[in-house]
């Protein structure tokens, strides 16, 4: 109990005093996971929309793959991304192993199926006649799609939150492809694991609390956007 | 409706801008030192063991090296087994490891060159204070036999690290094949293994540096030490650029040279004295294994 409390105090102390290392790690975490989430949104929402609108043979199989992808273990993703990005791997010439780009790629791979699957669920929850109605009212294809996305905003933002939550909290892939390099690829989760390994429980707890604060901050922002959408439709 | 729409759009745009701005700033920060630094290829990938990171030694050595040379070290702290494997695949530039027998194989295979002794400390067997197997003060072989006989929990690294390889060698020398529920392989770094041993009131083999660095959290005590078999020697090696054209050999050479330089050796031999009252590593540049009777 004592250590939890002292960890909280330590976290506050580090935050209030603007401990440069903690800030650096926290900002890098937001950058990496934020960028990965953006990528996964730009892939996942169109895929979800496409799946919700189109009927084609093998759709169920494709959906099962997406749903399978939602549970993709981060360490497995990390391992595969490593194999591709190694110096002597197929994408070795990019030279991005142990950089933030490798982490962003791995995290985007983890989050994309989550966003796609939940977007599909959100968009297929809409009345199927809505799109036809919009089109018959003179909307172009793109306008109709955009209106559908807006209509499903509640569910789509939940998808974004789930995607962000998935990548900001994972440690296996980030450790493997990023390497937890100080000042370069050290994010809150890998820093926490390392500090536990060093036996610095207070600092590990401080990193954990900072992580919780970061996650809450982002999710609160998205929730706010979600609720402003709710008022819209009422 | 329209007003609200534009407000939402604005919010989304703002968040997008923030993220782009952050990424942009990061990129700028990354570039600044690159322009001022001397080396052509700046990044040096150092594959090393968890003990050098968990003890805090690298936090002293790496900044000094970076400041002196302008290189940027990417430290990948894994077990010695994995570090050597990275060298064998050409995925690291320089290796700082502590499993002499396995190192020699890697050098013999041509994957690594210029193996130099850097430092040593020693392994110790630690365990709960009550010491159910009565190992205190015994020789290593006798202590390990006693642990096996008493079926007292023994936590093994189980990760092909230098410590794990040493442990396997010691079991062999003691003539014991460890198996059964008392012998537990954790597959974790040294720091984590010590935590588990602490919780389970088990025995484990550890390097002295990590143990001293973590002692404040542990109710374990040193039971076996000082046996000549427990020597823990660290070597630095460059990954062979003739075999792997992509390695940054200039950076590897510079790092290796720094470790055995008088400056690097002084940092090593004084590290930990202020905090633990004793040095965690003993500097050994210029020595060979013959000096230790190996």
Image: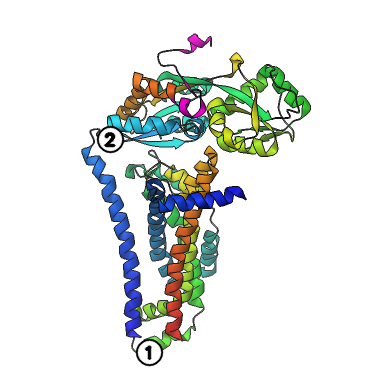
Residue named by callout 1: A136
Residue named by callout 2: B41
The reply to whether residue B175 is in sight is: no
- Residue B291 position, x and y percent, is 48, 9
- Residue B7 is left or right of residue A63, and the answer is left
Q: Residues within 10 Å of mark 1 (few under 14, many from 20)?
A: few
Q: Residue at x 73, y 27 (%)?
A: B131
Q: Secondary structure at mark 2?
A: loop
Q: How many marks?
A: 2
- Residue A199 position, x and y percent, is 55, 39
Marking on residue A29? none
Q: B272 above or below A17? A: above
Q: B34 above or below B176? A: below
Answer whether residue B273 is magenta in the image.
yes
Position of the N terminus of chain B, as image quadrant, is bottom left
The chain holding disc 1 is: A
Which range of residues does the magenta coloring cover? B271-293
Report the front residue among A113 and B109. Answer: A113
């Amino acid at each position: 109990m004592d250590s939890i409390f002292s960890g909280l105090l330590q976290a506050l102390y580090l935050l209030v005093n603007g401990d440069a290392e903690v800030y650096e790690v926290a900002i890098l975490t937001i950058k990496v996971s934020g960028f990965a989430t953006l990528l996964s949104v730009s892939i996942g929402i169109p895929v979800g929309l496409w799946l919700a609108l189109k009927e084609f043979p093998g759709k169920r199989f494709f959906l099962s793959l997406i749903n399978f992808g939602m549970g993709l273990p981060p360490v497995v993703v990390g391992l595969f991304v490593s194999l591709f990005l190694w110096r002597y791997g197929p994408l070795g010439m990019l030279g991005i192993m142990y950089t933030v780009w490798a982490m962003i790629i791995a995290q985007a791979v983890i989050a994309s199926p989550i966003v796609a699957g939940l977007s599909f669920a959100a968009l297929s929850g809409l009345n199927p006649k809505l799109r036809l109605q919009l089109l018959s009212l003179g909307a172009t294809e793109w306008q109709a799609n955009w209106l559908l996305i807006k209509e499903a905003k509640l569910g789509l933002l939940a998808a974004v939150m789930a995607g962000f939550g998935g990548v900001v909290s994972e440690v296996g892939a980030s450790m493997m492809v990023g390497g937890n390099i100080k000042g370069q690829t050290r994010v809150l989760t890998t820093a926490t694991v390392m500090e536990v390994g060093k036996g610095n429980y207070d600092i590990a707890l401080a990193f954990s609390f900072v992580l919780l604060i970061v996650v809450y901050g982002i999710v609160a922002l998205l929730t706010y956007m979600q609720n402003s959408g709710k008022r819209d439709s009422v | 409706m329209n007003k609200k729409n534009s407000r939402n759009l604005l919010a989304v745009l703002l968040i997008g801008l923030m993220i782009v701005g952050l990424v942009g700033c990061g990129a700028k920060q990354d570039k600044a030192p690159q322009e001022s630094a001397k080396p052509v290829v700046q990044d040096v990938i150092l594959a090393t063991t968890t003990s050098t990171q968990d003890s805090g030694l690298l936090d002293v050595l790496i900044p000094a090296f970076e400041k002196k040379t302008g290189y940027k070290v990417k430290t990948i702290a894994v077990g010695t087994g994995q570090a050597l494997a990275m060298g064998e695949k050409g995925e690291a530039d320089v290796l700082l490891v502590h499993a002499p027998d396995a190192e020699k194989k890697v050098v013999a295979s041509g994957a690594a060159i210029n193996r130099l002794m850097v430092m040593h400390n020693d392994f110790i067997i630690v365990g709960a204070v009550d010491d159910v197997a009565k190992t205190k003060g015994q020789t290593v072989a006798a202590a390990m036999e006693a642990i096996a006989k008493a079926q007292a929990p023994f936590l093994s690294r189980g990760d092909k690290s230098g410590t794990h390889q040493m442990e396997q060698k010691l079991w062999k020398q003691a003539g014991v094949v460890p198996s059964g529920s008392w012998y537990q392989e954790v597959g974790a770094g040294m720091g984590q293994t010590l935590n588990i041993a602490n919780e389970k009131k088990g025995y484990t083999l550890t390097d002295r540096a990590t143990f001293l660095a973590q002692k404040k959290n542990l109710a374990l005590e040193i039971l076996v030490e000082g046996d000549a078999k427990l020597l823990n020697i660290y070597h630095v090696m460059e990954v062979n650029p003739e075999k792997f054209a992509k390695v940054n050999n200039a950076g590897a050479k510079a790092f290796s040279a720094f470790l055995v330089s008088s400056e690097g050796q002084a940092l090593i031999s004084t590290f930990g004295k202020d905090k633990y009252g004793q040095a965690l590593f003993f500097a050994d540049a210029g020595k060979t294994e013959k000096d230790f009777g190996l």
